[in-house]
Image (cartoon, grey):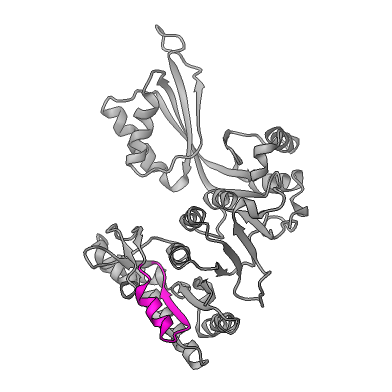
Amino acid sequence: MPLLVMKFGGTSVADLARIENAAQKVQREVERGYDVIVIVSAMAGKTNELVGWVNQTSPFYDAREYDAVVSAGENVTAGLMALRLQEMGVPARSWQGWQVPIQTTSQHSSARFVDIPRANIDAKFAEGMKVAVVAGFQGVSPENRITTLGRGGSDTTAVAFAAAFGAERCDIYTDVDGVYTTDPRITTRARKLEKISFEEMLELASLGAKVLQTRSVELAMRYKVRLRVLSSFEDTDETSGTLVCDEEEIMESKVVSGVAYSRDEAKVTLITVEDRPGIAAAIFGPLAEAGVNVDMIVQNISEKDYEDHPGAVTDMTFSCPVDQVERARRAVEAARDAGTIVYDDLVVDTDVAKVSVVGIGMRSHAGVASRMFKALADENINIKVIGTSEIKISVLVDRKYLELAVQTLHDAFELEKAG
């Protein structure tokens, strides 16, 4: 039988009525002739509640017990979904991570997949089971302890199962009806995309789009798993939603496919750093060890020069999430105290935002950067930092201009004509 993977997020299974709604969608796919693996998240808000209980009980908790507690939310949903399907006459069975078994590394709360053996689930399909309802977000370590995969882990679970079982497609049901050219809350001119490439989706996810978890897109791209993003709250058919697929499936690549943004950015500048070989490694090595997620990096000639060494100093600027600023500050100050770097001052600007345009068409079209910069200049939006890759251009701007910048770029690249 052809096989389909369907994943339902927390809002899609938030209560018994929504679980029944999701079960009806599963039933329709069974009636179309599919065997189905359903991946479920915890009911909306339950994981946060469980995490809160752990923190109240043990602020410096044992990570193994943390995983034992927070994985319980998905187990509840899986059982309820299986029961609902059974009541509807669909042969279904729930599966916890250890029952599959979903084999992971031992990194509790951030484990990664090692293997998903098919034998147990395949045997049940052969016996007449039509739906395997699998608890997402979890697995089992080599030490036979429950592990969890980190936030968004159910998306990754779904893609991993689709790859392991050779699924025809992996459908991600969520609270939006697809991937849009930008956030419809910022501009009503945003349009839903019929298709988007893995690479574009990966860039959009990493740049702030919340539709899919980054690791899930990486996995889908690696194993060529076709993803479909669609709404749990609308009637859907095989043409609904947005298909995330290989670039070769897209007839004509647009120059720019979407505009992404992140409000929670900070710009950090080290003033008058020594300009010598190895200085970048001396700065960014400690930042990496401290877990600071550095994004854009710019090195400038400093306005200040050492008196006896004109031109021997530089200013180093980088961006990072605003909630990692203090971690970054401690890391570079520790490096200065250890004598590995020297700088005069550390200047932090937490009132910035990142805006990015993404499109695989950039590879074959010149002038995207100039068009982007001119559009922002025409609105008197100053660019503080620029970062580029083969298919994206990102800028840091003052946070107060974020929505204007997104609207301006969406209009400049005529994304309202996308579809």
**What residue lies at 72% left-to-right and 58% top-to-bottom?**
191
Q: Quadrant of residue 71?
A: bottom left
The relative height of residue 344 versus residue 153 in the rendered view (above or below) is above
Q: Is residue 230 visible?
A: yes
The relative height of residue 54 versus residue 262 in the rendered view (above or below) is below
- Boundaries of the magenta span: 117-137
**What residue lies at 57% left-to-right and 44% top-to-bottom?**
353
Q: Quadrant of residue 12?
A: bottom right
Residue 326 is left or right of residue 406, and the answer is left
Which one is nearer the viewer's eye here, 409 or 35?
35
Q: Position of residue 145 (x, y in %)?
A: 24, 67
Q: Position of residue 80 (x, y in %)?
A: 44, 84
**What residue lies at 42% left-to-right and 82% top-to-bottom?**
126
**What residue lies at 43% left-to-right and 13% top-to-bottom?**
312
Which one is nearer the viewer's eye here, 331 or 198?
198
Q: Position of residue 229 (x, y in %)?
A: 59, 65
Which one is nearer the viewer's eye here, 389 or 381?
389
Q: Position of residue 113 (x, y in %)?
A: 36, 60
Query: Quick check: is 126 in the magenta stretch?
Result: yes
Q: Kindly give the residue lying farthest to the top in the view shown.
A: 308
Which one is nearer the viewer's eye here, 268 or 215?
215
- Count of numbered circles on the image: 0
Query: Quick check: is 217 in the magenta stretch?
Result: no
Residue 397 is left or right of residue 54, and the answer is right
Q: Is residue 96 visible?
A: no
